[in-house]
């Protein structure tokens, strides 16, 4: 039995809720403290951490619940002021593939309920992330009888349309998401495309889906001195640098990038590809999916023009962005695409796929270029045109920096609190008809 965490102020155990006092955020399959750029840790982890901290800084405390993956993790960790991360024992205390977590969800919900009883805390709203957490929130309604808002982050429906054979999401996920579309009290979509897909193809009630894009830390992601940053990451001052940042997963379109880069390398002398993300061994050699990327580059004779940096802590990324001439985001699908906006905030042009949230964040010809994910030659042409034209690159970089400022976390958190308030006040799915409320 671990020591019980003590919440400041009087215990709220036994009180009837009279408003919005504390939020339970659920991220069953991945922790906001996981190191980013690995297989299952990327934008969603950043989102849960940043949103919770900004919601708390606006006066609303948040407890984030995640599955315990090590016996040594403390039950409660403080992430920032008024945000606790609570490790819930459900299934073995070790990493487990997310596709096998479904069977542990009842135990997860039960342990969350017991935690609240033990500590005398109560929650007014749940914010669930990903379908596994959505099902958990649904189970918790039986214990707590409180509403929840759900963010899918991605859906099987949208992913399966573009995923290669063998990478299809499970029928269980697809069926569960369809049920959640019907059952959720509220859904937050990351972009208008996701909202439209949920309404038109998954038959969601439009008025329960609010579109609120994620935010970007515009204080962290700022333009930097290119030559100093190149020195810091060991890249030649005169090279033409194409940067990729992200998980090494087929959905991220790394295949497209490798084909595109082969063409860019032929056309642009000194073109270098820098890859941030994936795993390196102690000798700095790629392992796992990144080793497959390396082998392909050896086969195509391009390996000498590529640098692998592995996963990097987020606060180190501005140095990589500022060292780049162009950032490539070749994803097959992207619910938002934080990397594209981070690059823009750092004043770097982006060449991205015409997919999901990227369509709304990258402005064609202004902050970068968009190309279909399955047309590497179009990505290559766009990348080469930026590498060859420094005036174009400078203009796009300046525009991108200005455009990224509207994604500040303060604004995003205020919009999400608005959803929580409506839910806590008893409204259900009838307050998102007007997109402009959240514009
Ligand atoms: N990221 C990081 N270190 C890495 C790779 C990625 O901190 O080595 C962060 C990156 O800054 C971004 C997030 O992980 O905030 C990836 O989010 P994105 O929306 O681009 O992709 P997702 O992982 O959600 O598919």
Image (spheres, helix red, strand yellow):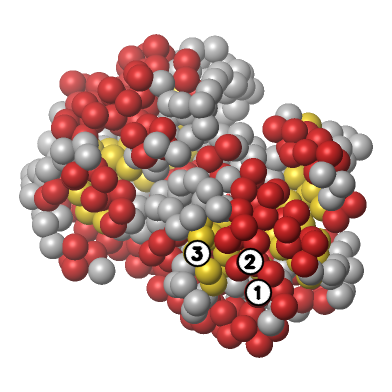
Q: Nearer the viewer, residue 108 or 9?
A: 108
Point out which mark residue 381 bears. 2
Q: CA distance from mark 2 to mark 1?
A: 6 Å
> Which is closer to the viewer, label 3 or label 2?
2
Q: Are marks 2 and 1 in contact (CB under 8 Å)?
A: yes
Mark 3 lies on residue:
370
Residue 189, percent across and down? 30, 50
Point out which mark residue 276 bears. none
Mark 1 lies on residue:
385
Query: What residue is shown at x 43% (from left), y 26% (from top)?
Result: 169
Q: Considering only order in the chain, which callout, 2 or 3, is on the residue closer to the N terminus?
A: 3
Q: Nearer the viewer, residue 324 or 62?
A: 324
Query: What residue is shown at x 50% (from left), y 77% (from top)?
Result: 365
Label 2: few (<14), some (14–19) or many (≥20) C-alpha neighbours in 10 Å:
some
Q: CA distance from mark 3 to mark 2?
A: 11 Å
Q: CA distance from mark 1 to mark 3?
A: 13 Å
Q: Quadrant of the C terminus?
A: bottom left
Residue 230, percent across and down? 82, 69
Horizontal side, residue 197 vs residue 213: left or right:
left
Q: Secondary structure at mark 3?
A: strand
């Amino acid at each position: 039995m671990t020591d019980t965490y003590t919440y400041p102020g009087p215990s709220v155990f036994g009180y009837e809720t009279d408003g919005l006092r504390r939020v339970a955020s659920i991220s069953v399959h991945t922790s906001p403290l996981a190191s980013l750029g690995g297989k299952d840790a990327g934008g969603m982890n950043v989102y849960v951490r940043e949103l919770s901290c900004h919601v708390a800084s606006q006066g609303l405390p948040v407890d984030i619940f995640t599955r315990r993956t090590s016996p040594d993790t403390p039950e409660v960790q403080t992430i920032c002021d008024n945000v606790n991360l609570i490790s819930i024992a459900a299934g073995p205390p070790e990493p487990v593939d997310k596709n096998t977590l479904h069977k542990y969800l009842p135990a997860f919900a039960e342990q969350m309920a017991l935690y609240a009883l033990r500590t005398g805390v109560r929650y007014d709203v749940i914010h669930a992330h990903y379908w596994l957490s959505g099902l958990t929130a649904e189970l918790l309604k039986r214990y707590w009888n409180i509403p929840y808002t759900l963010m899918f982050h991605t859906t099987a429906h949208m992913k399966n349309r573009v995923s290669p054979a063998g990478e299809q999401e499970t029928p269980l996920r697809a069926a569960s998401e369809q049920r959640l579309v019907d059952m959720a009290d509220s859904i937050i979509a990351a972009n208008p495309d996701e909202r439209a897909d949920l309404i038109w193809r998954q038959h969601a009630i439009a008025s329960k889906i609010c579109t609120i894009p994620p935010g970007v830390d515009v204080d962290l992601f700022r333009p930097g001195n290119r030559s100093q940053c190149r020195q810091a990451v060991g890249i030649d001052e005169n090279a033409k640098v194409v940067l990729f940042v992200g998980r090494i997963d087929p959905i991220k379109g790394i295949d497209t990038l490798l084909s595109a880069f082969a063409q860019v390398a032929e056309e642009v002398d000194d073109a270098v590809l820098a890859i941030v993300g994936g795993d390196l061994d102690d000798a700095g050699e790629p392992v796992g999916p990144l080793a497959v990327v390396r082998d392909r580059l050896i086969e195509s004779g391009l390996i000498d023009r590529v640098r692998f940096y592995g996963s990097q802590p987020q606060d180190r990324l501005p140095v990589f962005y500022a060292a780049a001439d162009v950032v490539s985001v070749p994803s097959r699908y992207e619910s938002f695409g934080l990397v594209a906006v981070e690059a823009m905030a750092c004043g770097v042009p982006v060449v991205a796929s015409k997919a999901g949230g990227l369509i709304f964040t990258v402005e064609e010809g202004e902050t970068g270029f968009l190309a279909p994910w399955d047309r590497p030659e179009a990505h290559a042409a766009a990348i080469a045109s930026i590498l060859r034209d420094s005036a174009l690159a400078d203009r796009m970089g300046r525009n991108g920096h200005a455009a990224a400022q509207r994604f500040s976390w303060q604004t995003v958190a205020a919009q999400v609190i608005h959803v929580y308030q409506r839910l806590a006040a008893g409204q259900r799915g009838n307050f998102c008809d007007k997109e402009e409320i959240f514009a």
